[in-house]
Image (tube, helix red, strand yellow):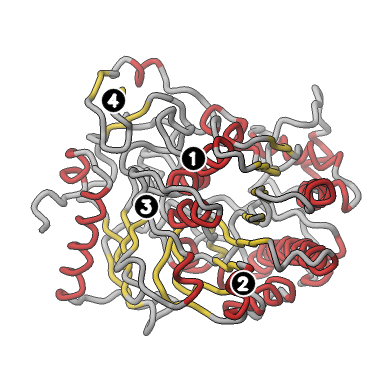
């Protein structure tokens, strides 16, 4: 079997025509849905980027035990398991977080990889004295502050080397993929992970895509909204959304070129294609930009999943209502390639669901370390907040103590103590570190990290835009029972129950 897993970052489900989106033309995503199986109730697991990828590799949630960080040495990885079984695995990605302190150990699980430089704040273009005056003239200071430079300045510098369309990281990712396919499409037993950071912010697309969605805005560049409440003028909001639309249109066109390649070389008969994302993004909905700081509204947590498998071509164009989530992809990949699923996995292969719309789970749980926990049964969704989200008391369990961009601080390391194994660490004891306030874990746990607080319940069938939080004791009781079952199944640390005020719940 051959598999191509296409992972876009921050690919909003509601923006795709296949999911009812109308604001952006996505003919190629929609074309793929017509010859594949579309999953209508697919959700995230751990948030955001790297925790989501750890879920993806291991087939289990990880946000209860640690925050953003590297792969752990005891973790299962579908890519490693395939490689050890003689299945060639290759990753192509412009996702810079793999190459920071908190992202190592993922790309090395593959047989080979190609890292495409220049995305976001990748330290790619070296300028000792960047043209700050010119950057200030071009970019809005609310998003690019040249008076107090930060990582966003590096993106502005990188853009001095991104001139023609082929210079953009997204097109270069696809160019690398076509090279891999030219060299290997006639071989068997390989897995290609084509991972594009687009349409993640900054929303920078070639002019020909931007022109399709131009709103006539003539101010400075607005393409990287802060994760804050919306405070922009209507025309500025429209400009940011137009820039996202332009980048999504680029993703759609280049994905279409992959579909054309499949057509040209008759690969549909022996190649599986899986399309998904890690999470969504709020583009002013609910009065917010971004993710993670606010409740994990549907725009963030309810994500696309579309799968073509040669053995189920008779199901082309059909849809599935089964509730699924990111963790389910790991056992699915293993089963596609005939490999055993490790006992630590808590997710479910979706191959049976390609044949018929059968239930694989009653509920899905998702969240971010030290943030609210979401639980849904596909109709109702609950966002549960702790009694005091800003207090200390949580513990990070890890053998790789690093945050997103830096190792744990000396103060954090001083709290280290040995703790017994969990049921997924293969008998390995871990180090436990106090989750200190102010540590640089996204989005942080200081007083500015979380906002829009408060446990709430929504019926996402009757109220898909989540405008009307409601009360329903029977539904709440069921969702809390489901939540507790998931926490128990993942061997959640005892202090987590108390911190979330769940110690006396069911």
**Of the residues tagged 3 and 1, which is closer to the observer?**
1
Label whose residue precedes the other's in the sequence (4 or 1): 1
Picture mark count = 4
**Of the residues tagged 1 and 2, which is closer to the observer?**
1
Numbered disc 4: secondary structure: strand
Depth order, front residue of 266/4? 266
Q: CA distance from mark 4 to mark 1?
A: 23 Å
- Sort mark 4 into few (<14), some (14-19) or many (20+) by Cα contacts within 10 Å: many
- Sort mark 2 into few (<14), some (14-19) or many (20+) by Cα contacts within 10 Å: many
Residue 244, position as x, y percentages in the image: 68, 62
Q: CA distance from mark 1 to mark 2?
A: 31 Å
Residue that badge 2 annotates: 15
Q: What's the residue at 62%, 74% (across, down)?
A: 36
Q: Name the quadrant of the C terminus.
A: bottom left
Depth order, front residue of 117/115? 115
Numbered disc 2: secondary structure: helix
Numbered disc 3: secondary structure: strand
Q: Name the quadrant of the N terminus.
A: bottom right
**Of the residues tagged 2 and 4, which is closer to the observer?**
4
Q: Where is 493 relative to 331, above or below?
A: above
Q: CA distance from mark 3 to mark 4?
A: 20 Å
Q: CA distance from mark 3 to mark 2?
A: 23 Å
Q: CA distance from mark 3 to mark 1?
A: 21 Å
Relative to residue 240, is residue 263 drawn left or right?
Answer: right
**Of the residues tagged 4 and 1, which is closer to the observer?**
1
Residue that badge 4 annotates: 432
Relative to residue 472, is residue 267 drawn left or right?
Answer: right
**Disc ID at residue 77:** 1
Residue 197, position as x, y percentages in the image: 66, 49
Label whose residue precedes the other's in the sequence (2 or 4): 2
Depth order, front residue of 97/115? 115
């Amino acid at each position: 079997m051959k598999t191509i897993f296409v992972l876009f970052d921050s690919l909003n489900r509601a923006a795709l025509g296949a999911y009812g989106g109308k604001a952006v033309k996505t003919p190629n995503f929609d074309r793929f849905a017509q010859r594949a199986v579309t999953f209508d109730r697919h959700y995230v697991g751990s948030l955001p980027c790297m925790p989501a990828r750890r879920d993806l590799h291991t087939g289990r949630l990880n946000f209860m035990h640690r925050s953003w960080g590297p792969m752990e040495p005891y973790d299962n990885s579908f890519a490693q398991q395939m490689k050890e079984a003689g299945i060639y695995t290759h990753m192509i990605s412009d996702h810079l977080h793999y190459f920071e302190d908190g992202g190592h150990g993922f790309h090395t699980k593959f047989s080979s990889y190609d890292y495409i430089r220049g995305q976001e704040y990748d330290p790619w273009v070296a300028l000792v004295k960047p043209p700050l005056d010119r950057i200030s003239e071009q970019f809005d200071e609310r998003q690019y502050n040249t008076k107090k430079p930060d990582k966003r300045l590096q993106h502005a510098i990188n853009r001095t080397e991104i001139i023609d369309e082929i210079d953009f990281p997204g097109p270069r990712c696809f160019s690398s993929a076509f090279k891999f396919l030219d060299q290997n499409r006639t071989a068997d037993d390989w897995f290609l992970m084509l991972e594009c950071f687009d349409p993640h912010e900054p929303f920078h697309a070639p002019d020909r895509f931007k022109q399709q969605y131009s709103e006539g805005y003539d101010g400075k560049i607005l393409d990287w909204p802060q994760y804050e409440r919306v405070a922009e003028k209507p025309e500025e909001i429209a400009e940011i959304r137009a820039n996202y639309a332009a980048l999504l249109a680029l993703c759609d066109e280049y994905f279409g070129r992959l579909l054309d390649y499949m057509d040209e070389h008759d690969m549909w008969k022996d190649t599986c294609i899986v399309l998904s994302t890690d999470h969504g993004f709020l583009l002013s909905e609910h009065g917010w930009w971004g993710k993670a700081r606010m409740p994990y509204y549907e725009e963030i947590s309810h994500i696309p999943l579309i799968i073509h498998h040669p053995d189920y071509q008779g199901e082309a164009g059909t849809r599935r209502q089964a509730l699924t989530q990111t963790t389910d992809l790991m056992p699915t990949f293993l089963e596609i390639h005939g490999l055993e699923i490790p006992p630590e996995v808590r997710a479910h292969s979706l191959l049976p669901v390609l044949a018929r719309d059968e239930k694989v789970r009653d509920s899905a749980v998702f969240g971010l370390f030290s943030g609210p926990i979401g639980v849904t049964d596909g109709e109702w969704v609950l966002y549960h907040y702790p009694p005091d989200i800003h207090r200390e008391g949580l513990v990070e369990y890890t053998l790789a103590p690093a945050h997103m961009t830096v190792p744990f601080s000396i103060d954090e390391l001083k709290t280290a103590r040995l703790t017994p194994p969990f049921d997924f660490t293969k008998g390995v004891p871990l180090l436990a570190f106090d989750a200190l306030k102010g540590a640089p874990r996204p989005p942080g746990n200081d007083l500015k990290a979380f906002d829009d607080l408060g446990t709430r319940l929504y019926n996402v069938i009757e109220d898909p835009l989540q405008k009307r939080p409601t009360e329903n004791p029977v539904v709440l009781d069921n969702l809390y029972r489901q939540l507790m079952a998931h926490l128990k199944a993942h061997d959640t640390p005892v202090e987590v129950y108390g911190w979330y005020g769940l110690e006396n719940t069911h």
